[in-house]
Amino acid sequence: MHTDEFEISLTREYNVCVNQVNEIKNYISTLENKYQWTTQTFIENYKSNILQKDNIDFDSWYKKYNSLTKWEKNLKEYHELLKDMRLKRRS
């Protein structure tokens, strides 16, 4: 059963995910510009042990990249739930 409260809560969670994804992407973009690498290149080099593991930027970049995939997954799920909820409400 659909309630306005549930939709409000779900929308709030969706917005939190949007904000997190945007913040992480901005952070990653800053590091891409700083080191002149794409994230894909960085991840490949990091996993291949080509890069220093004690570099704070690299460690953070790797962690942020991994968290981005999780936040994007959540965002997609919230988006689908909201879309379904709104479609059901209209019918």
Image (spheres, rainbow, N blue to C red):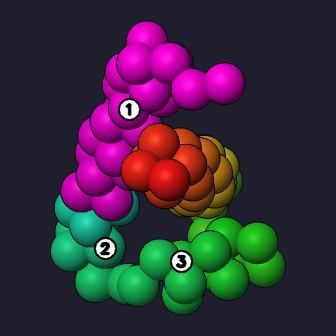
Q: Nearer the viewer, residue 91 or 13?
A: 91
Specify which label sits upstream in the sequence, 1 or 2.
Answer: 1
Q: Can residue 48 be seen from the camera position used here?
A: yes
Q: Nearer the viewer, mark 1 or mark 3?
A: 1
Stretch in magenta: 1-27
Q: Nearer the viewer, residue 35 or 68?
A: 68
The local secondary structure at tag 1 comes to helix
Q: Is residue 59 above or below residue 11?
A: below
Q: Is residue 72 above or below residue 12?
A: below
At a point 47% along the width and 77% down the height, the residue shown is 39
Give coordinates of residue 55: x percent, y percent.
51, 50
Q: Nearer the viewer, residue 45 or 70?
A: 70
Give coordinates of residue 71: x percent, y percent.
55, 47
Q: Amino acid at mark 2?
A: Glu
- Horizontal side of 20 relative to 46 (left or right) equals left
Q: Is residue 1 above or below residue 53?
A: above
At a point 66% along the width and 24% down the height, the residue shown is 1
- Label 3, on which residue? 42
Q: Mark 3 packing: few (<14 Cα in 10 Å), some, or many (20+)?
A: many
Q: Is residue 52 above or below residue 41?
A: above
Q: Nearer the viewer, mark 1 or mark 2?
A: 1
Specify which label sits upstream in the sequence, 2 or 3.
Answer: 2
Q: CA distance from mark 1 to mark 2?
A: 31 Å
At a point 41% along the width and 85% down the height, the residue shown is 38
Q: Amino acid at mark 1?
A: Thr
Query: Are the residues tagged 2 and 3 within 8 Å (C-beta)?
Result: yes
Q: Which of the numbered marks, if any, corresponds to residue 62?
A: none
Give coordinates of residue 14: x percent, y percent.
42, 38
Specify which label sits upstream in the sequence, 1 or 3.
Answer: 1
- Label 1, on which residue? 11
At a point 47% along the width and 42% down the height, the residue shown is 89
- Label 2, on which residue? 32
